Image (cartoon, grey):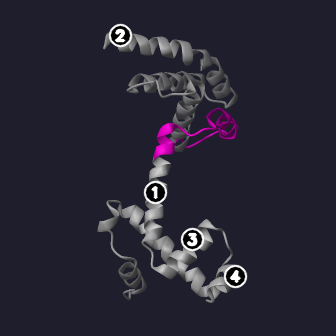
C-alpha cells in the first residue's frame, strides 16, 4: 500500500506537476480568483489521489486540464455571477482534451449497441424509415419516394421511433423487459380531458 502511494506520488510529480503552471496561467487568463485557482488545482490533485490506478492515463496533461475544466464548470453553474472572460476561456481549454477518455469510449460504445438493439425492435416500416432518416441521412421526401408513402407518414414513423428509443433508454434495464412500441404509442395518443 505504501509502495503504491509512493509510485503514484512519483508519477504525479513527473507527469502532472510540470503542467500546473499552464493550468494556473489558463485559470488566471480566465479571470478566476487566485484563491479559487488554488482550490481547483488542489481538487485536481485529490482526484488523481482517488483514482484506483493511473496506468491507463495516456495524456496526463489533458487529464489534468479536463479535471480542472470540469471543476470550474461546476463552480460556474453554482455561481450567480460569472465574468464573460471566464466563459470565453473555457472553450480554449478544449484544445487539451481532444480525445475522449477510455471510459467515455466504452460508455459510448455500450450506448450505441443499446440504441442499435432498440432500432432492431421497431416495427418493420418504422425501422426502415428511422434508419433511412437518422442513419443514412435521407430527406423525408427521398424516403417517401423510395417507400411509396407520404412525407407525413415518414415524419410520424421517425417520431414513433424516437419516442420508443428515448423512452426505453430512460426506463433502463434489459431490453426484453421493456414494453412494446405499439402499446406505448397507443397509450401516448389517448389523452384524458383536463
* Residue 64 falls left or right of residue 136: left
Q: Position of residue 89 (x, y in %)?
A: 69, 36
**CA gap, disc 2 and disc 4:** 66 Å
Mark carried by residue 175: none
Name the N-terminal-most of marks 1 and 4. Answer: 1
Describe the element under mark 1 as helix, strand or loop.
helix
According to the picture, the residue beneath numbered tag 3 turns out to be 131
| Residue 55 against residue 182 in the figure, above or below | above
Q: In the image, which is nearer the foreground, mark 1 or mark 2?
A: 1
Which residue corresponds to mark 1? 113
Which-is-in-front pick, marks 2 and 3? 3
Q: Which residue is mark 2?
A: 3
Q: In the image, residue 45 lies at what x, y percent?
A: 48, 22
Asked if the residue at tag 3 contacts the one at tag 1, i.e. Cβ–Cβ closer than 8 Å, the answer is no
The kind of secondary structure the magenta stretch mainly shows is: helix
110 versus 18 height, above or below: below
Mark 3 vs 4, N-terminal side = 3
- Marked residue nearer the N-terminal end (2 or 3): 2
Of callouts 1 and 3, which one flags the residue occurring earlier in the amino acid sequence?
A: 1
Assess disc 4: are there few (<14), some (14-19) or many (≥20) residues with their C-alpha within 10 Å of its C-alpha. Answer: some
Amino acid at each position: 500500500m505504501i509502495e503504491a502511494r509512493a509510485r503514484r506520488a512519483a508519477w504525479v510529480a513527473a507527469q502532472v506537476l510540470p503542467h500546473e503552471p499552464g493550468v494556473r496561467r489558463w485559470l488566471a487568463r480566465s479571470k478566476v480568483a487566485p484563491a479559487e485557482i488554488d482550490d481547483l488545482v488542489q481538487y485536481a490533485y485529490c482526484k488523481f489521489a482517488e483514482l484506483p490506478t493511473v496506468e491507463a492515463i495516456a495524456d496526463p496533461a489533458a487529464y489534468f486540464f479536463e479535471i480542472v475544466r470540469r471543476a470550474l464548470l461546476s463552480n460556474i453553474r453554482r455561481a450567480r455571477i460569472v465574468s464573460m472572460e471566464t466563459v470565453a476561456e473555457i472553450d480554449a481549454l478544449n484544445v487539451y482534451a481532444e480525445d475522449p477518455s477510455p471510459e467515455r469510449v466504452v460508455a459510448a460504445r455500450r450506448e450505441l449497441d443499446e440504441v442499435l438493439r432498440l432500432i432492431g425492435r421497431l416495427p418493420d416500416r418504422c425501422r426502415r424509415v428511422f434508419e433511412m432518416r437518422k442513419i443514412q441521412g435521407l430527406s423525408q421526401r427521398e424516403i417517401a419516394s423510395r417507400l411509396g408513402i407520404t412525407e407525413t407518414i415518414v415524419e410520424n414513423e421517425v417520431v414513433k421511433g424516437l419516442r420508443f428509443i428515448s423512452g426505453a433508454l430512460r426506463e433502463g434495464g434489459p431490453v426484453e423487459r421493456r414494453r412494446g412500441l405499439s402499446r406505448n404509442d397507443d397509450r401516448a395518443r389517448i389523452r384524458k380531458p383536463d
